[in-house]
């Protein structure tokens, strides 16, 4: 049994195809069509830290941040602003999609209440020192006098804090939570913020659509009733916008490319039945890919679907070659041609799979999903063509228009004068020119903005909210890692010392949940020190005599002190107390602890980075800068993987055709890729990671064309017509991708538009060279 | 010595709720300048009570304070003096049994207000945002700016003629639940004197009652007159700018 004889494996392929089809239908039925379409930007952003624990912590924080949003109400009249806020809160309070988060006041009150049992373990350094140096008598007299003071505030009632110590230590501790950008009047304007949390999946397109409409309706109602402005801030709004754009892109690309391809096929074959196989293979291929990706990852990223739409261009190729080489000569029953076609189809599938599979080596989750989606789609569409194709072509489908034949002849007449030597020189010159351009000119860009271009209004709104409601640099933080809480705390101390030593930045410019938690040793010391206050011979007893404090108060507080022995405040407790109010700035796993430290606005990033360079376990993360670096690394890595893919395909070709010369077939996509670099220089656009990723597909397409030229060489005219038609369909779909509003998609489309155009030219040149080769063989034979 | 130890055990804060705590004292102080509440008009946010109808530019007075604290079977009592000058500010000095003085000064050049706290001869300038907010609030009250008080409090008039101020702003809300003002009618006053009772309910629902009697001055108060009413000399020097504190 040969792998390259369709007839011998037909039943096997039909069985596999049927099984996969049934599984697809079964899975879709099992989840009742409730597919999750993900729109998060995390998948398309590269990892910016190397530690697994840090990545988990960042992921956890990201997931939380994705759900948070902030609405800023601004107006000139404070009462109007409060009224507008009340109306907005009232409307959103009834929402099932979003919940209102406690404001800063509520958070502080919650901390006062929940930290009460821990108050015996909390003392500031100054309090600690004073307590150690003071006699019982001094403490007693001081406390007796302080009850008259007008300048002291008691967080806790007198009977819970008769010395006023706990109020002071709590106030001292919670100062870090006091935001200088507190909602307040600034100039003539009054600002109030409303923090919200999305209840469902904030990155789900369905949720986004519902919630966006609901929010817009509520905001419009508030704007109608009050003279205020409402600004929005949050990842949600950017993701929702990106999703909306992607949705439009999907509709546009899928709609126009499908319509274009359908019209082209109808025009070429003049038969509705000619649409059956391409449409069926596209639907089944893309459908299976969607279901398989969903089953594998639990959702399908919107970018995967956009790229997946490009599958149409490739999947249709199989049908077209089938029509040209099977259907046209169906009556003749040329089994050799059928087998040659099948060999070409299989080899074409293999090279495309290699091209797409190489994408899975990318560090970007989205591209891995694209690789999986595309490989599944291609394989299923291929199976559909080889299984369903023979049934479809029984009706006899023939290419009618003369323009394809004329176009092929015209193109051949252009490339006929090219000798092998000339073609060889052209390949070398283009290759050298591309490499030189790559090194000599700045044609590569690793700007993270390639992921998404937000509308100016959304960015302005985000900036305005950040200016009013945030003290911290967006996208910048210090990451602290350690094996224990104490180790992370010690590193936080080192970070604070380092920035004080190496910069003029005050240590208070850093904010962390760790600022609220003294080390376990300090807490123990604080507890022990308070023996002087609440112990058997503590000041509480002499104070009771001095000011006639109730005996049950003395007994109660002494008991509370005794019960608090061993109770230690940890960042996890703070995190738990604040719950959803605070993003998870503290992350605990089985073997590691990770803390995030926020950086006050206006700090010099370079100096901070320099100061922290020597601190073990601390990493300064500037998301923008790290993403740029990571993208550059990914681009270089992708280029290496592309070269690897070329090598693998060359090896496959050598093995298939049993001659080293077969490796030269890769020159077609190689030159097409080189032409992209030259086009970038000539037309002044910069290449990014996604252009490089698209070159994997250029390789796949180029190999498709050259394989069919070689395998189906004895039917050159038909083969070249099929290639021309397939190139037209591909260019139609990929050309549209280049018009996308999403920079990533547009980059992908542009690379494929340029690359595949030159692939087509290369296929004709290669076709001419194979003719010359045969002539040589004939001459030598003579 | 004892005072210093107390101050260190309960160190003063440059920011945070401690500042809000001082507001209790300062808001109490400002209550002394409020006229007895006798009007019958309904009160609203836009129309605060006519409690700021202060026509006197200079006056001095004395006060007594009673605090009821949870767990304490007796009231904590104290007393002291105060001075008001429309062009300088306010001194609020507690001298029995403890010595603590608050000085609020208006900077004529910058039209900003500055707050100081004196304990045991040590002067501390209160620089926080909340202190600034508070001193601005008091200066608004001193200058009879009803819009100022309406922005910080919701005013309610009670049936007995007293008025209650409920904080609107979060900084005040954290420390004070409400403040009630009523005219002192059960005391004998001298010529031109008037009295007021202020009841402050704080966040822990602990109550402070202040009763104060004020005497208008015909002429601007001086450093000498300040010292005469048993206000610490350092506070007076600070008030009359003969002492500079950075």
Image (tube, coloured by chain):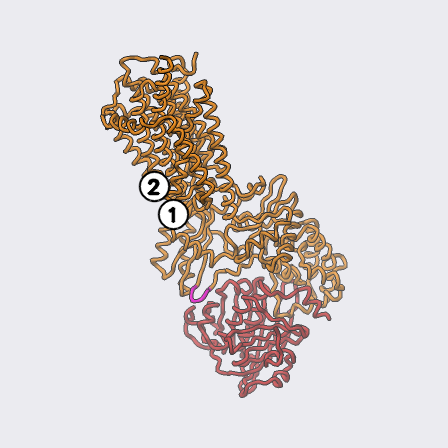
Chain colours: A orange, B red
Between disc 1 and disc 2, the foreground one is 2
Q: Secondary structure at mark 1?
A: helix
CA–CA distance in space, label 1 to label 2 = 26 Å
Q: Are marks 1 and 2 on the same chain?
A: yes
Percent x, y of residue A393: 29, 19
Residue B182 is inside the magenta segment? no
Please, which chain is the residue tagged with disc 2 on?
A
For label 1, the residue is A212
Q: Quadrant of the N terminus of chain B?
A: bottom right
Percent x, y of residue A564: 68, 51
Q: Quadrant of the C terminus of chain B?
A: bottom right
Q: Nearer the viewer, residue A544 or B15?
A: B15
Residue A551 placement: quadrant: bottom right
Q: Bounds of the magenta span? A: A185-189
Magenta segment's dominant SS is: strand
Q: Secondary structure at mark 2?
A: loop
Q: Badge 2: how crowded within 10 Å, few (<14), some, or many (20+)?
A: some
Percent x, y of residue A467: 47, 58
Q: Nearer the viewer, residue B4 or A377?
A: A377
- Can residue B190 be seen? yes
Percent x, y of residue A478: 58, 50
Q: Nearer the viewer, residue A270 or A180?
A: A270
Please, which chain is the residue tagged with disc 1 on?
A
Q: Is residue A311 above or below residue B34?
A: above
For label 2, the residue is A739
Residue A222 placement: quadrant: bottom left
């Amino acid at each position: 049994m040969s792998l390259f004889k369709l007839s011998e494996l037909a039943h096997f392929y039909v069985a596999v195809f049927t099984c996969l089809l049934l599984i697809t239908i079964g899975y879709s039925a099992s989840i009742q069509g409730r597919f999750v379409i993900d729109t998060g930007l995390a998948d398309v952003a590269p990892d910016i830290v190397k530690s697994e624990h840090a990545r988990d912590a960042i992921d956890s924080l990201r997931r939380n941040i994705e759900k948070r949003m902030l609405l800023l109400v601004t107006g000139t009249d404070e009462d109007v602003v409060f009224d507008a806020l009340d109306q907005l809160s009232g409307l959103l309070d009834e929402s099932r999609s979003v919940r209102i988060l406690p404001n800063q006041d509520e958070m502080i009150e919650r901390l006062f209440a929940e930290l009460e049992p821990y108050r015996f373990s909390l003392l500031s350094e100054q309090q600690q020192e004073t307590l150690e140096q003071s006699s019982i008598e001094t403490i007693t007299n001081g406390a007796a006098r302080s009850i008259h003071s007008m300048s002291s505030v008691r967080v806790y009632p007198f009977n819970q804090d008769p010395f006023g110590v706990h109020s002071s230590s709590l106030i001292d501790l919670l100062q870090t939570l006091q935001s200088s950008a507190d909602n307040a009047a600034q100039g003539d304007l009054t600002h109030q913020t409303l923090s919200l949390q999305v209840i469902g999946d904030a990155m789900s397109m369905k949720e986004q659509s519902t919630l966006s409409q609901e929010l817009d309706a509520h905001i419009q109602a508030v704007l109608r009733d009050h003279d205020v402005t409402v600004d929005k801030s949050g990842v949600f709004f950017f993701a929702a916008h990106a999703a909306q754009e992607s949705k439009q892109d999907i509709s546009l690309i899928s709609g126009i490319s499908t319509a274009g391809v359908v019209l082209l096929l109808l025009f070429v074959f003049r038969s509705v039945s000619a649409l059956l196989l391409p449409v069926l293979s596209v639907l089944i291929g893309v459908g299976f890919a969607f279901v398989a990706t969903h089953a594998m990852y639990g959702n399908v990223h919107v970018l995967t679907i956009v790229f997946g739409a490009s599958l149409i261009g490739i999947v249709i190729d199989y049908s077209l070659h089938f029509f040209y080489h099977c259907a046209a000569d169906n009556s003749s029953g040329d089994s050799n041609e059928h087998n040659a076609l099948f060999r070409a189809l299989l080899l074409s599938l293999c090279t495309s799979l290699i091209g797409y599979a190489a994408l899975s080596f990318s560090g970007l989750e989205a591209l891995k999903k694209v690789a999986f989606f595309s490989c599944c789609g291609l394989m299923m569409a291929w199976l559909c063509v080889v299984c369903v194709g023979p049934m479809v072509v029984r009706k006899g489908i023939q290419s009618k228009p003369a323009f394809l034949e004329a176009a092929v002849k015209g193109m051949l007449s252009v490339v006929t004068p090219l000798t092998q030597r000339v073609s060889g020189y052209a390949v070398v010159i283009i290759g050298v020119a591309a490499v030189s351009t790559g090194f000599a000119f700045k044609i590569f860009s690793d700007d993270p903005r390639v992921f998404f271009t937000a509308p100016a209004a959304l960015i302005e709104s985000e900036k305005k909210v950040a200016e009013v409601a945030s003290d911290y640099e967006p996208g910048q933080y210090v990451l602290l890692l350690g094996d224990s809480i104490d180790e992370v705390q010690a590193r936080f101390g080192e970070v604070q010392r380092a920035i004080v030593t190496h910069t003029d930045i005050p240590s208070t410019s850093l904010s962390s949940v760790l600022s609220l938690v003294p080390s376990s040793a300090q807490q123990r010391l604080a507890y022990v020190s308070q023996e002087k206050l609440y112990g058997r011979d503590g000041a509480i007893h002499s104070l009771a005599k001095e000011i006639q404090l109730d005996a049950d108060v003395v007994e109660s507080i002494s008991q509370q002190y005794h019960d608090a022995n061993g109770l230690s405040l940890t960042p996890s407790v703070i995190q738990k107390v604040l719950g959803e109010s605070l993003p998870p700035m503290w992350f605990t796993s089985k073997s590691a602890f990770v803390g995030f430290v926020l950086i006050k606005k206006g700090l010099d990033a370079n100096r901070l980075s320099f100061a922290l360079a020597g601190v073990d376990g601390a990493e300064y993360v500037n998301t923008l800068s790290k993403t740029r670096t990571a993208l550059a690394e990914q681009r270089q890595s992708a280029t290496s993987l592309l070269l690897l893919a070329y090598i693998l395909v060359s090896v496959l070709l050598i093995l298939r055709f049993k001659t080293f010369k077969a490796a030269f077939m890769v020159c077609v996509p190689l030159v097409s890729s080189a032409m992209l670099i030259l086009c970038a220089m000539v037309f002044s656009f910069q290449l990014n990671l996604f252009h490089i990723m698209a070159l994997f597909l250029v390789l796949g397409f180029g190999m498709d064309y050259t394989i069919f030229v070689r395998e189906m060489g004895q039917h050159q005219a038909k083969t070249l017509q099929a290639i021309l038609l397939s190139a037209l369909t591909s260019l139609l779909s990929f050309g549209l991708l280049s018009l996308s509003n999403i920079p990533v998609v547009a980059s992908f489309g542009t690379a494929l538009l340029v690359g595949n155009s030159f692939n087509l030219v290369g296929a004709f040149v290669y076709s001419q060279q194979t003719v010359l080769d045969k002539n040589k063989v004939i001459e030598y034979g003579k | 010595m004892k005072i210093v130890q107390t101050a260190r055990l309960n160190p003063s804060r440059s920011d945070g709720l401690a500042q809000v705590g001082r507001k209790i004292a300062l808001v109490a102080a400002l209550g002394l300048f409020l006229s007895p509440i006798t009007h019958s008009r309904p009160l609203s946010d836009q129309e605060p009570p006519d409690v700021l109808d202060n026509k006197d530019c200079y006056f001095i007075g004395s006060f007594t304070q009673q605090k009821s604290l949870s767990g304490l079977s007796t009231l904590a009592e104290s007393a002291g003096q105060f001075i008001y000058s429309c062009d300088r500010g306010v001194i609020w000095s507690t001298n029995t049994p403890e010595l603590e003085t608050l000085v609020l000064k208006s900077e004529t050049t910058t039209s900003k207000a500055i707050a100081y706290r004196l304990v045991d001869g040590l002067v501390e300038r209160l620089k926080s945002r909340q202190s600034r907010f508070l001193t601005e609030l008091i200066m608004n009250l001193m200058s009879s700016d009803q819009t100022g008080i309406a922005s910080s409090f919701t005013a309610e008039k009670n049936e007995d003629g007293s008025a209650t101020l409920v904080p609107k702003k979060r900084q005040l809300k954290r420390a004070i639940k409400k403040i009630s003002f009523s005219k002192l009618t059960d005391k004998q006053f001298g010529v031109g004197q008037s009295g007021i009772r202020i009841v402050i309910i704080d966040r822990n629902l602990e109550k402070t009652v202040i009763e104060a009697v004020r005497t208008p001055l015909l002429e601007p108060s001086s450093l000498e007159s300040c010292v005469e009413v048993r206000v610490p000399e350092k506070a007076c020097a600070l008030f009359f700018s003969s002492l500079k504190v950075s």
